[in-house]
């Protein structure tokens, strides 16, 4: 397995810190889908993201934004592009995925998360301004196109996406989301 894919990612805090490492430029949003009331938490750049993420270990259906926003998860409020991603439904064979990427001439992802129903692939970026969205979207679409035969979710292609938090529980399978 490529060196970067061997990164241990056992906690929600480490997941958040890896996704939003360095200087943060906007809010990171955390969603508690199965709370009594669907609850959103906005973590601003001045707040401790590791602490905000840490409380989600062992909790059911918790998600984090992969990019940063000025307040809410709307394209018009996009502040910083932090990652490209692919949500592979019902795909658990990491080596098959890596072979498909190699065949398509696409670099290996920075890290992979086992979502409980498949895989989330992440390619971390140096923070990019919102003005880079058209290029980001073209690359995002290419990643999904290349992995479509392996189950890439064609609906999961937007910059406002939230993905499952490592260490949380996927209620659909009962599995712990693992990095």
Image: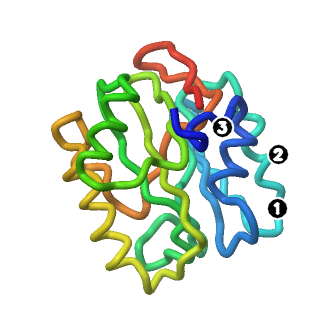
Left or right of residue 92: residue 174: right
Residue at the location (68% across, 48% down)? Answer: 16
According to the picture, the residue beneath numbered tag 1 turns out to be 47
Q: Residues within 10 Å of mark 2 (few under 14, many from 20)?
A: few
Comparing 95 with 156, the one in front is 95
Alpha carbon separation for disc pair 2 and 3: 21 Å
Left or right of residue 141: residue 17: right
Residue 162: where, in percent of width, then height?
48, 49
Earlier in the chain: of badge 2 and badge 3, it is 3
* Color encoding of the figure: rainbow
Comparing 100 with 173, the one in front is 100
According to the picture, the residue beneath numbered tag 3 turns out to be 7
Q: Secondary structure at mark 3?
A: loop
According to the picture, the residue beneath numbered tag 2 turns out to be 51
Q: Secondary structure at mark 1?
A: loop
Residue that protrudes farthest toward the left in the picture: 149
Q: Residues within 10 Å of mark 1 (few under 14, many from 20)?
A: few
Comparing 158 with 147, the one in front is 147
Q: Residues within 10 Å of mark 3 (few under 14, many from 20)?
A: few
Residue at the location (48% across, 81% down)? Answer: 130
Earlier in the chain: of badge 3 and badge 1, it is 3
Residue 43: where, in percent of width, then height?
71, 59
In this rendering, the answer to whether 131 lies above or below 106 is below
Residue at the location (44% across, 69% down)? Answer: 74
Residue 116: where, in percent of width, then height?
45, 22
- Labels 2 and 1 touching (C-beta < 8 A): yes
């Amino acid at each position: 397995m490529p060196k970067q894919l061997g990164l241990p990612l056992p906690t929600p805090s480490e997941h958040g810190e890896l996704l939003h490492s360095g200087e943060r430029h906007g809010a990171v949003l955390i969603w508690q889908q199965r709370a009594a009331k669907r609850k959103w938490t906005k973590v601003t750049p001045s707040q401790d993201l590791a602490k905000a993420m840490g409380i989600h270990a062992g909790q059911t259906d918790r998600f984090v934004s992969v990019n940063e926003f000025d307040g809410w998860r709307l394209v018009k409020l996009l502040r910083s592009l932090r990652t490209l991603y692919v949500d592979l439904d019902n795909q658990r064979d990491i080596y098959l995925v890596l072979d498909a990427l190699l065949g398509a001439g696409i670099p290996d992802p920075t890290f992979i998360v086992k979502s409980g129903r498949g895989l989330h692939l992440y390619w971390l970026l140096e923070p990019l301004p919102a003005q880079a969205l058209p290029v980001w979207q073209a690359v995002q679409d290419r990643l999904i196109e290349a992995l479509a035969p392996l189950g890439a979710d064609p609906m999961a292609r937007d910059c406002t996406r939230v993905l499952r938090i490592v260490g949380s529980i996927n209620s659909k399978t009962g599995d712990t989301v693992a990095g």
